[in-house]
Image (cartoon, rainbow, N blue to C red):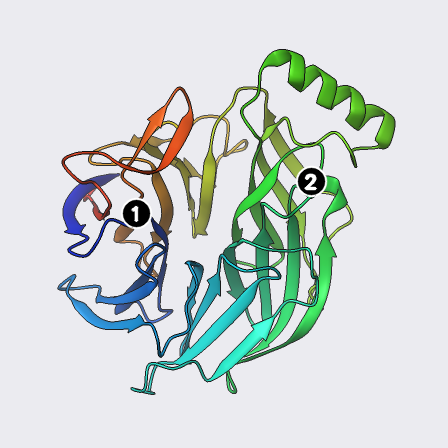
Amino acid sequence: MFALSNLIPNDGQPSLIDEVCFRPSGEMFGATYEYNDEVRLYDARTLSITRVFRNPDAMLNRPHALLLTARHVIVANKAPFPAEFRIFRLDDDSGTPTFTYTTPYAHLAACHSIALHGRRLVATYCEGPGKEGALVSYDYDDESGRIVGPLDKRERWFSPYGDVKGVSFDETGERVYVTIQSELMPWRRKAIRRLKNAVSFGSRGGSSRNGIAVFGIDSQGRFTRRPLWKRISRRFCRLENIHVRGDYAAITDADGDCVQLYDMRSADPFETPMQVLSDSLVFPHGAKISPDGKLLVVTNFGIENVDHLPKWRSFVSPRNDHIAVFKRQPA
């Protein structure tokens, strides 16, 4: 079980703190500050800031998705269309990206989350014009710090469900877990969308469901045509991110102001959470378990959420746009 240990406040201007990610060695983690156009790196032991990537050198534009590799920091800007990646070398003190990549899919924007296993980089997209979301795999070379090109894409399947948000490989690298989030809508509008989905095979109605789906992925980065497994909820929830580490999975529910922890060893792992964390969580968004399994780091937007509708520029008082650090307790 985990318990709250520390809070890392945002000492700058109020900002959505979107994503968090540990370096594979575990000695540092990073977080994206969307409104500040910054990426901050932290010492995982002292929780102090060790480095900040900021404009104009960093060329960030509402940074959202984040990944730390052995050699690089990969950041996906939320704006503009199509989605752009900035890649920085950890051993380069200039603060400028050494490589920039724009997805070849012109309609895809708002790269929400990214995950890496070997050379396979997977990314989720949401909020595209006329689209509900997509799951894309890329060939990534960490030696050079370059995204070589796309490998596969799943898009149409998500249309009747919702935006693709969080993404995580399992430990084997053979499965990809994604969270799905629909829009909040009145029941009449939802019924009309479901009818449109039924007659258009899911391509015109738009999202109306939330949940988790698991896709298979082969060594070439090709996804299974349909999910191997899915759990769909008719109840509105805002499952922003998922992270699978060993025997555990962490899912952020921003609408419920909590992080749900699941035991992946159980027969039906997502039936009931083994622990629900809510201490000092205000619209939690990103969550990662450290490589040694001892820390759970959660980013918070700290914004008002009225009748399930987030107020994107209305920060609560006192401020809660912070990073919450939970420590695993001895059994």
Residue 136 occupies quadrant: bottom right
In the rendered view of the protein, which quadrant contains the C terminus?
top left
**Image location of residue 126, percent across then percent down:** 58, 47
**Mark 1 falls on what kind of element?**
strand
Q: Which residue is mark 1?
A: 298
Left or right, residue 279 beside residue 291: left
Left or right, 295 with respect to 71, comes to left
Q: Amino acid at mark 2?
A: Phe
Give the side of residue 178 with respect to residue 24, left or right.
right
Q: Is residue 134 above or below residue 65?
A: above
Kindly indicate the quadrant of the structure image that contains residue 315. Answer: top left
- Residue pictured at 65% horizontal, 41% vertical: 132
What kind of residue is marked 1? Answer: Val
* Residue drawn 69% across the image and 61% down it: 106
Residue 187 screen position, x and y as percent:
61, 12
Q: Is residue 290 left or right of residue 229?
A: left
Q: Residue 93 appears at what percent x and percent y?
A: 29, 86
Q: Looking at the image, is 193 positioned above or below residue 136? A: above
What is the residue that sits farthest to the right in this orientation? 199
Identify residue for label 2. Answer: 158
295 w.r.t. 73: above or below: above
Provide the secondary structure element on which disc 2 rests: helix
Note whether residue 169 is visible.
no
